[in-house]
Image: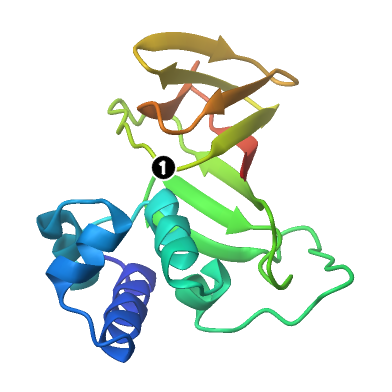
């Protein structure tokens, strides 16, 4: 697994250790299976962004601290220049770039997400809250609660993120979209 995932896993373990919680206790507090929590902490498995946000909300830390190891400091505004967001590569074909990583106590988590063409598998996940996706370029298929919707450049969707959902690039080109998790 890539170095970034291993570093995030170390920060997850460090947070749990600092809170003096067992894996069982932390998993129960986050509402996920202990085996999943342990797998994410191992650094040998993809760690969904939704899980990182969930852990941050549950334990009162900033998602940025888990993603990058840095604490956000901005309180009035935060500018992210093109290509400079805090990046997370979940897998070779799925990349996130946090766009508000420097803003303290953000009410929403905006990401620029790139999904490479050719990825045939669609991993479904769920997380608390709602999500907004706006396609910047390419075409993507999004599955939400068993419904498949195709979105083209300029299309958007807002949905209940507690429903199983996943995205993939279609049409032979990468898809790039704005995802806002609230």
**Is residue 138 toward the left or the right of residue 136 in the image?**
left
Please name the residue shown 30% across and 33% down the image: 123
**Is residue 182 toward the left or the right of residue 99 in the image?**
left
Q: Is residue 43 visible?
A: no
Looking at the image, which is closer to me, 56 or 77? Answer: 56
Q: Which residue is mark 1?
A: 127
User: Where residue 173 sits in the image (x, y, percent)?
Assistant: 53, 26
Position of residue 2 relative to residue 175, above or below, is: below
User: Where residue 93 sits in the image (x, y, percent)?
Assistant: 40, 44
Q: Quadrant of the C terminus?
A: top right
**Is residue 138 toward the left or the right of residue 82 in the image?**
left
For residue 47, what is the image quadrant?
bottom left
Please name the residue shown 42% across and 60% down the image: 52
Position of residue 90 relative to residue 151, above or below, is: below
Looking at the image, which is closer to me, 50 or 156? Answer: 50
User: Where residue 24 sits in the image (x, y, percent)?
Assistant: 13, 67
**Is residue 9 toward the left or the right of residue 135 in the image?**
left
For residue 1, what is the image quadrant?
bottom left
User: Where residue 149 sits in the image (x, y, percent)?
Assistant: 50, 10
Looking at the image, which is closer to me, 67 or 158? Answer: 158
Position of residue 81 relative to residue 134, above or below, is: below
Q: Which element carries disc 1, helix, strand or loop?
A: loop
């Amino acid at each position: 697994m890539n170095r970034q995932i291993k570093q995030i896993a170390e920060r997850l373990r460090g947070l749990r250790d600092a809170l003096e919680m067992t894996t069982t206790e932390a998993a129960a507090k986050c509402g996920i299976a202990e085996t999943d929590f342990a797998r994410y902490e191992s650094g040998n498995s993809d760690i969904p962004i939704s899980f990182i946000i969930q852990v941050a909300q549950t334990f009162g830390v900033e998602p940025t601290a888990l993603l990058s190891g840095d604490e956000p400091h901005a309180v009035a505004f935060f500018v992210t220049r093109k290509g400079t967001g805090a990046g997370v590569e979940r897998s070779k074909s799925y990349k996130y770039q946090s766009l508000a990583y420097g803003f303290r106590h953000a009410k929403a988590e905006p990401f620029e997400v790139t999904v490479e063409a050719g990825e045939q598998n669609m991993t479904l996940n769920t997380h608390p809250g709602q999500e907004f996706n706006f396609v910047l370029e390419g075409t993507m298929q999004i599955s939400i609660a068993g419904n498949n919707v195709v979105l083209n450049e300029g299309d958007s969707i807002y949905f209940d993120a507690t429903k199983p959902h996943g995205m993939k690039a279609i049409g032979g080109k990468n898809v790039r979209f704005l995802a806002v998790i609230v």
